[in-house]
Amino acid sequence: MSEEKFRWCIETGDINGFIDALKNIKDVNKELGNGRRPIHIAADFGQLEMLDLLVKNGADVKDNYGVTPLLAAVYEGHVDCVAFLLKNKAEIIDAPNGRRMYECTDLDDIKRLLQP
């Protein structure tokens, strides 16, 4: 399966295609373009089941380069993905623009998860 099709499976929540692709993926932390790894894409698109499968297959939730998977989920307002990533030890760090992560959302549910 091409990287483009793998990315499409993540974005659209195609679990069967994703599971099929995982059989041929050697590194779930490999960038799929623009410095984004599969876990970033899953977080950005609110694909909680994909996040779970990626973490179970070794995806790193602690990436501190640029926009982390956690920050992507915060920006897009995916409360369930934020909670999942935090449960799996994602670090709450400042956004690249220097703002605190809880300042990057208007959603109270996410702010509660992120505030000290």
Image (cartoon, rainbow, N blue to C red):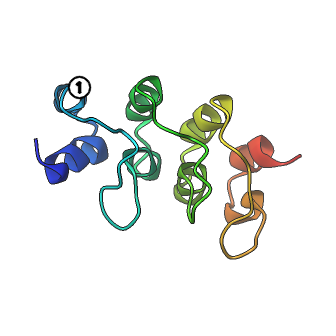
Asked if 3 appears above or below 97 in the picture, the reply is above
Residue under pointer 1: 19
Can you tell which quarter of the image residue 21 is in? top left
**Residue 108 x/y as whole percent:** 74, 50
Q: What residue type is labelled 1?
A: Ile
Q: Residue furthest left?
A: 1
Question: Front-most of 87 and 1?
Answer: 1
Q: Badge 1: how crowded within 10 Å, few (<14), some, or many (20+)? A: some
**Residue 43 x/y as whole percent:** 47, 46
Q: How many labels does the image show?
A: 1
Question: Front-most of 79 and 15?
Answer: 15
Judged left or right of residue 44, residue 14 is left
Q: Which residue lies furthest to the right in this view?
A: 116
Judged left or right of residue 86, residue 27 is left
> Could you tell me which residue is drawn at 68 percent across and 64 percent down?
104
Can you tell which quarter of the image residue 19 is in? top left
> Could you tell me which residue is drawn at 12 percent across and 48 percent down?
2
